[in-house]
Amino acid sequence: MSSQAPAHEDAHEAHHGHSHGHQAGHGTFKSYMTGFVLSVILTAIPFWLVMAGVFDSQALTAVLVMGLGAIQIVVHMVFFLHMNPRSEGGWTMMALIFTIIIVAITLSGSLWVMHHLNANMMPMSPEMMKNMP
């Protein structure tokens, strides 16, 4: 019976001892604070751009806000979700790439459909708009 106990303990240690593919590790206080400070900065800059009306062009302001938002997404994934090419054997990065492709297809398709609906709709006069329910 004593010969079975070490085999069972070794199997138990082997099961609980390995990291299940989590090679990224947990973040330190410094990495969480770095992520927090970057997130606050990346939130404050777009807020300032919009509230202060820094640029006359709304399109430029919108592009900058979206760009800073995309950078903030990367900051959250790196500092809070601990995503990198090594975590989970690369599967998290593959899932992220797949998600980005699906979102890009969905957004571009939606914008394309809305543009064509807008271009092909019958124009309404202001008198017709008054009679709408």
Image (cartoon, helix red, strand yellow):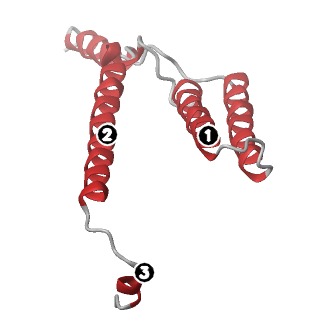
Q: How many marks?
A: 3
Q: Earlier in the sequence, mark 1 or mark 2?
A: 1
Counting from the top left corner in percent of width and height, residue 73 is at: 53, 33
Residue at left offset 33%, top offset 46%: 111
Tell me the residue at 76%/49% (across/down): 53
Q: Residue at x 37, y 14 (%)?
A: 18
Which sits in the foreground, 35 or 60?
A: 60
Q: Which residue is mark 1?
A: 65
Q: Secondary structure at mark 3?
A: helix
The quarter of the picture where residue 56 lies is top right
Whether residue 126 is situated above or below residue 83 in the rendered picture: below
Q: Amino acid at mark 1?
A: Val
Mark 1 Cα within 10 Å, few/some/many (few <14, many 20+)?
Answer: some
**Residue 50 versus residue 26 in the image, above or below:** below
Q: Earlier in the sequence, mark 1 or mark 3?
A: 1
| Residue neighbourhood size for the residue with mark 3, other residues' Cα within 10 Å, grouped as few (<14), some (14–19), many (≥20) | few
Quarter of the image holding residue 4?
top left
User: Label 2: which residue?
Assistant: 108
Instruction: Identify the secondary structure beneath mark 1.
Output: helix
Residue that appears at 51% across and 24% down: 82
Name the amino acid type tagged 3.
Answer: Pro
Circle 3 is placed at which residue position?
Answer: 126
- Dot 2: element: helix
Horizontally, residue 59 falls left or right of residue 23, namely right
| Front disc: 3 or 2 | 3
